[in-house]
Amino acid sequence: MTEDRRTEEVSPVREILKPDASDAHFGVVIAVMASAVIGWMAGAGPALFILGISGCPFLIILICQLAMKRPFRTATRRAYLYTFGIFQWF
């Protein structure tokens, strides 16, 4: 199997699973709104915990991207998309 043929076969799957910026923006809105509702109902401590749950994976992915010698802007964009872009499946 040639490299071009393999790329053509994987391409539709990647397009379906690849998160984009609109999905990531939606994910951030959900995280912030969930934190606001929890903060309103239970106080600041649980609200900050919810934000920490969404912030820790972002930092871990960002550190991994920077460790792979990616430029900071590219690493930040990828970390943002991979952390909050998962909401495309909901």
Image (cartoon, helix red, strand yellow):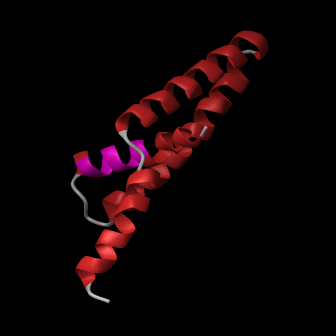
Which residue is drawn at the image coordinates 21% and 54% (left, top)? 71
Q: Quadrant of the N terminus?
A: bottom left
Whether residue 78 appears in magenta in the rendering, the answer is: yes
Which residue occupies the foreground of this view, 90 or 37? 90
In the image, is residue 22 above or below residue 72? above
Residue at x-position 36% and y-position 36%: 21
Chief secondary structure of the magenta portion = helix
Q: Residue furthest top?
A: 40
Q: Position of residue 29 (x, y in %)?
A: 51, 23
> Residue, x 43% and y 61% (percent of image)?
13
Q: Is residue 68 magenta?
A: no
State the residue at coordinates (71%, 23%).
Answer: 45
Q: Residue 84 placed where, x, y %?
A: 49, 39
- Residue 26, compared with residue 16, is above or below; it is above
**Residue 11 percent location from the top left of the image:** 34, 63
Percent position (x, y) of residue 63?
A: 40, 56
* Above or below 8: residue 31: above
Q: Is residue 43 left or right of residue 75?
A: right
Quadrant of the drawing holding the C terminus = top right
Q: Which residues are magenta?
A: 74-81
Left or right of 88? Residue 49 is right
On screen, 31 above or below 38? below
